[in-house]
Amino acid sequence: MDIDTSRFSFAVLTMSDKGSRGERVDTSGPLLQKILAEQGYRQANYAIISDRVDHIREKLIAWVDKEKVDLIITTGGTGVAPTDVTPEAMAGVLEKEIPGMAEAMRAESLKKTPNAVLSRGKAGIRGKSLIINLPGSEKAARENIAVLLPALAHALDKIQGGVSDCGT
């Protein structure tokens, strides 16, 4: 069964202190917007914010609870640097984790770099929305979203109450 991706909205949230101050150009956010739009998803929002747990939580909760965005992809803040706090912010946002998505991204990335073991990104559900954390580099964001693209539409359909079988 083919799922019409145009029925799903998406937003991209970049976490970058330098980017939020205009000191660095965000390349992963625009790349992710392009990839998702090419897959047929409808763009609802995009923002660059600082690496602060409260800012991240506030933006994600607003996009899910108020704007009803179906798919939110974050980029940045998933590593081990002192300012990398995206996974900690997810603790106040996600209602259900989907560890298989994060595990699949790390497993594929590990084929390319041993540093993949340092990635702490999460994926999960809030309400009827799917939120996925990707690394901040353009290369890593491209590689990681590619791992999930084949399952995204089915995941969104199921999260929103779809009754299609998972094995088809």
Image (tube, grey):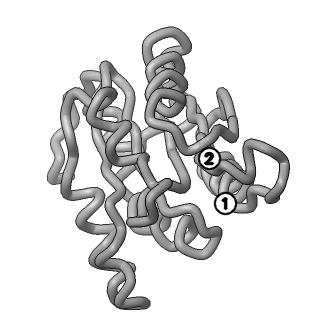
The reply to whether discs 1 and 2 touch (Cβ–Cβ < 8 Å) is yes
Residue at 64%, 69% in the rendered image: 138
Residue 40 visible = yes
* Front disc: 1 or 2: 2
Tell me if residue 131 comes above or below residue 60 in the rendering. Answer: below
Q: Which residue is mark 1?
A: 28
Between residues 108 and 55, which one lies in front from this camera angle? 55
Ranked by sequence position, the earlier of labels 1 and 2 is: 2
Q: Secondary structure at mark 2?
A: strand
Residue 14 numbered mark, or none: 2
Tell me if residue 112 comes above or below residue 38 in the rendering. Answer: below
Q: CA distance from mark 1 to mark 2?
A: 8 Å
Judge from the rendering whether residue 74 lies leftward or rightward of residue 137; answer left or right.
Answer: left
* Screen quadrant of the N terminus: top left
Q: Residues within 10 Å of mark 2 (few under 14, many from 20)?
A: many
Residue at 62%, 41% in the rendered image: 50
Three-letter amino acid code at the position of disc 2? Thr
Residue 81 point in image, percent of width and height = 45, 65
Residue 70 point in image, percent of width and height = 46, 28
Q: Residue 48's image quarter?
A: top right
Residue at 51%, 16% in the rendered image: 62
Residue 14 point in image, percent of width and height = 62, 46
Between residues 8 and 45, which one lies in front from this camera angle? 45
Q: Secondary structure at mark 1?
A: helix
Residue 121 point in image, percent of width and height = 35, 56
Residue at 65%, 27% in the rendered image: 44
Q: Residue 148's image quarter?
A: bottom left
Quick one: which residue is furthest to the top in this view? 66
Judge from the rendering whether residue 60 lies leftward or rightward of residue 32; answer left or right.
Answer: left
Judge from the rendering whether residue 61 lies leftward or rightward of residue 98; answer left or right.
Answer: right
Tell me if residue 131 comes above or below residue 16 in the rendering. Answer: above
Three-letter amino acid code at the position of disc 1? Ser
